[in-house]
Image (tube, helix red, strand yellow):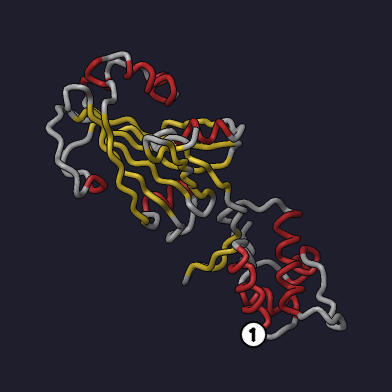
Amino acid sequence: MQFCNRSGEEMQKIFKDIDKSSPIPLYIQLSEILTDYAKQYQLKSGDVLPSENELLSRFKVSRHTIRLAVERLVQSGTARKVRGQGTFFMEKKRVLPVYYPHAFNGSLERLGLHVTNKLIDHKVISGKIDWIEGLNSTNWEEPVWIRRLKSAQDELLAIDERILSGSVVKRYSKEEIENENLFLDLMGRNLDTQTKSFNYTFVAHPLTKEESNLLQLPLNTQLLRRVGEYYNSMEERFMLSRLTILSDRITLRYEYSMHKEGWSIKG
């Protein structure tokens, strides 16, 4: 919800008053009022909270009090400040135990969450691919870029990108590509796309301007990117991937246990 240009009367209706006779510090009361508002109006991550000037006008308290209240929200993980853009609400993060490093969908489903994919790009690319910087260049003929939005319970959690040879992609329909589990199952039935080994590189990176516009999220939204290479039994690389996780909404937790043979991921 955007608060710009709201009248004083509207702000008066939206927020309850601070009790200036209460022994509870004003900044704590204000932070609780904002938290209650977020619950009442079911704010989503990325929704804009009122500006400092709007809060000044509504509550008639000092800037110091407002800044303390906002900082309390930031410290609790309820809000995030972005310089030059404002203060944004943040929903409580989901903690995602990752049972297998490559099984993002499976880990979500084990928590009882229904995962959906929305195909937003499916096109032949040419030239340099900026996000595979540091990886060996590919010699595939007409490589195809597939990009999907990955959500659970109608909440966007990640952007899933794959680059494959055009000769591989043309085997599958749009519907098969959009359904990740089916897509990977079909690929696993072919010798040239059966995964024998893979590697991942994790990097922290802010949203790009293009991603910000696509997702309607503020620039500098916290992201964790997982870039991977997949190899078949002939040690040929057949797929590149990038999973961009909105880390203001989800936290990955890798769980390991000790066995006689050494450490292994729980599952």
Mark 1, Cα crowd under 10 Å, few <14 / some 14-19 / many 20+, is: few
Given the image, on which type of amino acid does mark 1 rest? His
Residue depicted at x 41% and y 37%: 264
User: Left or right of 66: which side holds 20?
Assistant: right
Residue depicted at x 63% and y 56%: 1
Q: Residue furthest right?
A: 21
Residue depicted at x 55% and y 64%: 80
Residue 167 in the image: x percent, y percent? Answer: 21, 20
Residue 2 in the image: x percent, y percent? Answer: 61, 60
The quarter of the displayed image where residue 6 is located: bottom right
Residue depicted at x 40% and y 49%: 211
Return the residue nearer the eye: 131 or 75: 75
Badge 1 element: helix
Q: Residue furthest left?
A: 139
Return the residue nearer the eye: 14 or 24: 24
Up-down relation of residue 103 to residue 174 (above or below)? below
Kindly identify which residue carries mark 1.
64
Residue 188 in the image: x percent, y percent? Answer: 33, 18
User: Left or right of 60: which side holds 219?
Assistant: left
Residue 208 in the image: x percent, y percent? Answer: 36, 54
Up-down relation of residue 29 to residue 128 (above or below)? below
Return the residue nearer the eye: 150 or 14: 150
The quarter of the displayed image where residue 58 is located: bottom right
Give the mark count: 1
